[in-house]
Amino acid sequence: MQKTQTVFDEMNGEAGNVRYPYEEYQKWLSEEDPARLRRKSTAAEAFFRRTGITFNVYGREEAAERLIPFDVIPRVISGREWARLERGIEQRVRAINAFLHDIYHRQEILRAGRIPRELIANNDAFLPQMIGVSPPGNVYTHIVGTDLVRTGENEFYVLEDNARTPSGVSYMLENRETMLQMFPELFSQVKVRSVSDYPKHLRRSLGDCAPPACSGKPVVAVLTPGIHNSAYFEHSFLADQMGAELVEGHDLRVVDGRIAMRTTQGYDPIDVVYRRVDDDFLDPLNFNPESQLGGAGSMDVYRAGGITIANAPGTGIADDKAIYSYIPEIVQFYTGEKAILQNVPTWRCAEADSLAYVLDNLEELVVKEVHGSGGYGMLVGPAASKREIASFRTKLKARPGNYIAQPTLALSTVPILTKKGLAPRHVDLRPFVLVSPRNVKITPGGLTRVALKAGSLVVNSSQGGGTKDTWVLEE
Amino acid sequence: MILKISHLTKYRFEEPVHYALQQLRLLPKSGVGQNVVYWDVTVTGGERELEFDDQFGNHVMLVAIDPGKTDISILCEGEVDTTTLHGVIGPNKGFAPLWLFLRSTPLTIPGSRVAKLIKELGTDHETDVTRLHALSRLIGEVVPYQTGETHSETTAEEALIAAAGVCQDHAHIFVAAVRQMGFPARYVSGYLMMNDRVEQDATHAWAEAYLPDLGWVGFDVSNGISPDDRYIRVATGLDYQDASPISGLRLGSGGEHMDVTLQVQQ
């Protein structure tokens, strides 16, 4: 692809001098024998494969999905940079929870005309069954994975809010574990904030959201669709790390007005279910009757205050890509503050002017499906062939409301280790956010996804991306 | 008027039940035009698990059928004091926004038959209310009341094609057409005391439309009137599925038979 914008390299900066956050790492790297580094890289892969296999004892098929390439060069963020990201993310997540409460109650934001009614009324992500539900602490998004990209020293953009069931946190934990194994001396030289407490914080955060019916220590369970789900290893890993039960739909019954799980001693009530099952499959009595992945009656028990569902059903209305473009207004409306983190400028193709602009500039834009995810069904204009653009143009004209478009951002790069030494590759960042009635907690770090192909801007693992350990420095 | 209700629903399963849940929307609330003097629900063969209010404000009871049973019965007995309001329920209450009632559902998707109906109705009416009364009459003519021609999953379009149907079909056609005309509309299930009898065939269903001047107004297509003090509203929703008296889910094989005995009297 052609590059017209300058690309910000997070390690080497613009003038080619190592940027401040990487100074200590660079010192270590310059003393490191390149051959040893390469050996460690191979060892890291083997370490990963080994852990990967323990994760995959339940289902061989997932092994292929599981082994996402790992790069040993860390992505480093200074404490000061992180503090600003943290403030921005917390503000955004609080606004999203206020929005969700409002949209399922009085809908003040619609009455005030700040977002168009049609955007909600004609949106399949609005879940009527959530109308009038106030979950404990009014927390709707217990776990959020905000996708960020960087284009300059102080330029961060939120790409997606991922308020449904973000995955990938197990990579954050494993990547760090691998780095600690491979380079223990490095961590005594560079002060990196720990991420390993995440499962403990997740457990506590979910427990803090226990429903009124909970008596005593909250019982947490992870609901997985089962071994055939591509993220199964993460579900079992998190359950194990939290000391929570891993359950499937067929383990669940309504007993004494609660959702209870089958145990060797009978049925035990669940207080908080961390569900990794989509809304539609969550409860065959209230949603898709064909689903065998959820617990029948879950919504009834939820509405009666007998269980907390994390994340709440219906949160998709806040991370729909058409709603995304209104998040700055949403932040302003509920917090009275200007958004600290910027949105990527977004053209809503449902609007005639925007559609005309997008059709005229397809070669330069990224076009995404409003409900799409995982990098599927999108067009990256600068990287697309004439024919791909032509066929996308037809789709876009047929259903403009189904698409949004954004400029092709010059995503920042971080070096990866290649056969020929270090080479820059584009990255994004997904920090993991825990929301409880007490606080909003952001683990210092997150999942850095990296496009392994030179020049590629698509970081999704399904599209050939890899991952890196993400360091936030103690300061 | 005080209406006395005794409503017995019996299910018989061909195979003993392994695990089954039933949602009961059989609990009328006091509100505009009706005051619930008392209301008792007796479940035999199952456990009352919990109660909650759903997104439409309906009071719902969740029942788990006892494992191994082949019979469950649900008896509702109560007295409701009603007043005649000529169908006018008034302002929209609760959190369900009016725009929600403009959404069509699988049972109420408007098609060519609904379009034809609206065309036939014309626009030559003095007010919105007279227009909707005319619509109600028209549906009654086009789809005469007849049992056995439709079932609980028949759509509004299908009932128009069949040119026969019951109160559920009438209500579905009415809400489909009214939404198409730009007014919010909802389905209502409840009780009706037919004047000539104590033993009623089944629970009743009608529809409500939201008009800017009056708020919610009821229309009973099957009887060609707006509800009066012989009606008790029990549950509302976008269609039958939202408001049906009993909806359930059962693990296991074998068929089931349902039998309803309903008395509504003064």
Image (tube, helix red, strand yellow):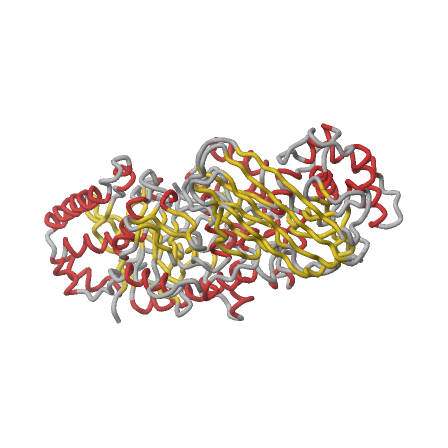
Q: In the picture shown, does residue A438 fall above or below B238?
A: below
Q: Is residue A151 visible?
A: no
- Name the residue rendered at 61%, 38% in the picture: B259
Occupied quadrant, residue B252: top left
Q: How many marks?
A: 0
Q: Is residue A324 visible?
A: yes
Q: In the picture shown, does residue B50 fall above or below A94?
A: above
Q: Is A235 left, or right, of B15 in this rendering?
A: left
Decide which of A157, B243 is in the foreground and name it.
Answer: B243
| Image coords of residue B142 (percent x, y) | 80, 32
| Image coords of residue B56 (percent x, y) | 62, 54
Q: In the picture shown, does residue A364 fall above or below A23?
A: above
Decide which of A398, A260 is in the foreground and name it.
Answer: A260
- Name the residue rendered at 30%, 55% in the picture: A244
Occupied quadrant, residue A205: bottom left
Quarter of the image with the C terminus of chain A is bottom left
Quarter of the image with the N terminus of chain A is top left
Q: Is B93 left, or right, of A360 in this rendering?
A: right
Q: In the picture shown, does residue A254 fall above or below B34?
A: above
| Image coords of residue A217 (percent x, y) | 33, 64
Occupied quadrant, residue A443: bottom left
| Image coords of residue A49 (percent x, y) | 19, 42
